[in-house]
Image: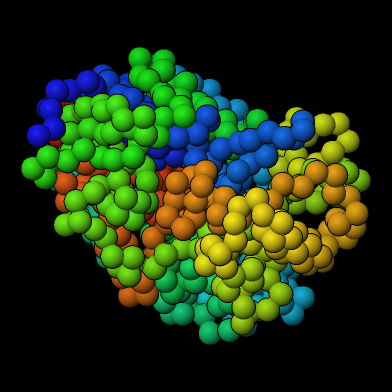
Amino acid sequence: MVSTKESTDVIVIGSGIGGLTAAALLQERGFATVVFEKNRYPGGSCSSFQRDGYKFDAGASVFYGFGENGTSGTLNLHTRIFRKLGVDVHTIPDPVQIHYHLPNGFSIPACYDRHAFLGALAARFPHESEGIKKFYHELDEVNDILSSMPAGSLEDLTHLLSVGSANPLKTLALAMKSFRSMGKTARRYINDEELLHFIDIEAYSWAVQDAVSTPLVNAGICLADRHFGGINYPVGGSGAIPAALCKGIEKFGGRLCYQAEVTEILVDNGEARGVRMADGTEHYARAVISNATVWDTFNRLVTDSRYRVDEQRFLRAPSWFQLFLGVNAAVIPPGFDVHHVLVDDWKSYNQPGGTIYFSAPTILDPSLAPPGKHIVHVFVNGDFEQWEHFERGSSAYRAAKEEVAAAVISRTERILPGLSQAVELKVLATPLTHERYLNRYKGSYGPLLKPGQNILQKPQNTTPIKNLFAAGDSTVPGQGVIAVTYSGVSCASYIARKFGKPLDELQ
C-alpha cells in the first residue's frame, strides 16, 4: 500500500509550457508546487540550447499571446500571465507571421496588416474575393468571442455558468462553432482548389493537419490573432518563455528539480498519490499534473493496464527532422522575412519531408549569434519508423542524417541561394532525438483529432484517475505554444477551484 503522506500540494511532471503555466499560477495562488524535469533546462519543445556561441530555438519560434490588452482585443495569455506573476518578458514584433512559397509561383506573406494580407489573397484570386472576406471573417468572429471570455476550464461548471450568464449569445455561438472544422467552413465560401490548398497549408503550418481536420476554434485563435495581437519574438529566444515561468514559480516559493526523471505515477485505489523517480525515491502530493503525452502518461508512467490508451484512439502527429545552422550573415539579404514555409508539390505537402519550415530569428534578435553570423533553423516532419532501426551514434545513423540534411538544404536554396556554402555550424536532430530528450512517445508532436472528431473529443485536464490531471498538447485545445499555455491555465483553474482556492481572472 502506497503511503498517503503529502510532501507538497501539486507535483508537475515535465517542464513543458503547459505544466509550467499550471505550476506558476497555482504557486502564485498559494499552492505548494514542485516541477520535476528530466533535462537540465526547462521548456520542452519551447526551449533554447547553445552551441559554439549560437543560441537556437529547440522548436517553436512563432509566438502569439504577447499583445497588449485594451488595444489588440486578443486573448494575450502570455501578457496576462506574466503580468500576474510580476515577471517581464521583452519581445520584438514580427510584421510577418509566415512567408509562404507554394507551387505554381504562388508566394504570399501572411502579415500583421490584415488589409494587406487579404488584399494580396484577393489579387491572386480575384474571383474569390468575396469568399475570402467571408471565410476570414468567420475566424475573426471566433477570436472576438474568445477575447471577451476569461480563460478557464471547460470542465469547471462554476466557470462555465459564470461565462455563460455574462456572455449568453457569445457562449452559444462558440458552442456551435466548436463543432465545425476550418476546412469545411472554408468550403462554404470558396471553390478554387489552389486557394483551398493555401488554406490547408495555413492549418498545416501549426496544426500538422489539413484544414478539414482542424477545428475552427483553433484556427480562430491563431490565424485571426496574428492580425490583432500579432507575432512577437521573445528577446533571447524561445527559452525566455519557460525561463520567465520558472522565475514566477520560484518567486512565490515553488521548486524546480532538474535532471529529475519521473518513472512512475503512484496510483492507489484509482487515485494518484505521487511519483517515483529514476533514483527510486518517492514524492507525494494532493494532485499530480502530467505534461507528458497521453500515451506516455497512461502507457508508461501509469503501470496499471486498465488505464492504457490505445494509440489508434487518435492520430499520432509526426515528429521532426531538424537542422540548426550557424551561417555567414551575408547569405541572408536585406528585407528577408524571418519565417518561411516551402511547398514543392501539393500532392506531397503532408507527407514526410513534404513541407519545409524555415526561420532565421537573428533577423529580429542578432544577440542569438556571434557578430556577422545568423541562425537558420530548418525542419521537416518525419516518421519515427524511418529512423528507429538506426543505432544512435553509429556511422550509418550519421550518414543518413547528413543525406537528409543535404537534400533539405538544397531545396531551401530555392528561397536562400548559396545556403549550402554559407553553413559554418550544423546540428541535426531526428525523431529519435525528440524521443530521447523530450520523453515523447515516438518523438511525436502529440495526438491529433481524426477527421469528423470535434475539439471537445480531445482529452481535457481531468483523467480517469482521481487527482491526476493533464496539461500540454495532448489536451484541449491542442498543438502550439499558445494552445498549451491555455491548457495550463485551464488545468490550474480546475485544480484551484477543486481544492477551495479559485484563481482570480487573468487581467
Q: How is the image coloured?
A: rainbow
Is 95 drawn above or below residue 345 in the view shown?
above
Residue at x 57%, y 50% (from the top left corner): 433
| Count of marks placed on residues | 0
Q: Position of residue 132 (x, y in %)?
A: 55, 72
Question: Could you say where residue 429 lies in the image, as x and y percent from the top left?
Answer: 64, 51
Q: Position of residue 5 (x, y in %)?
A: 14, 23
When the figure is inspected, residue 257 is found, relative to residue 340, above or below; the finding is above
Whether residue 161 sits left or right of residue 21 in the image: it is left
Left/right of residue 330 with respect to residue 56 in the rendered view: right
Residue occupying image coordinates x 57% and y 34%: 239
- Residue at figure coordinates x 53%, y 50% from the top left: 434
- As drawn, 485 above or below 398: above
Task: Name the image quarter holding the C terminus.
Answer: top left
Up-down: is 342 above or below 262?
below
User: In the figure, residue 364 lies in which quadrant?
Assistant: top right
Q: Quadrant of residue 353?
A: bottom right
Q: Is residue 474 left or right of residue 393?
A: left
Residue 465 spot, x, y in % from top left? 16, 46
> Quarter of the image holding residue 3?
top left
In the image shown, does 217 or 460 lie closer to the viewer?
460
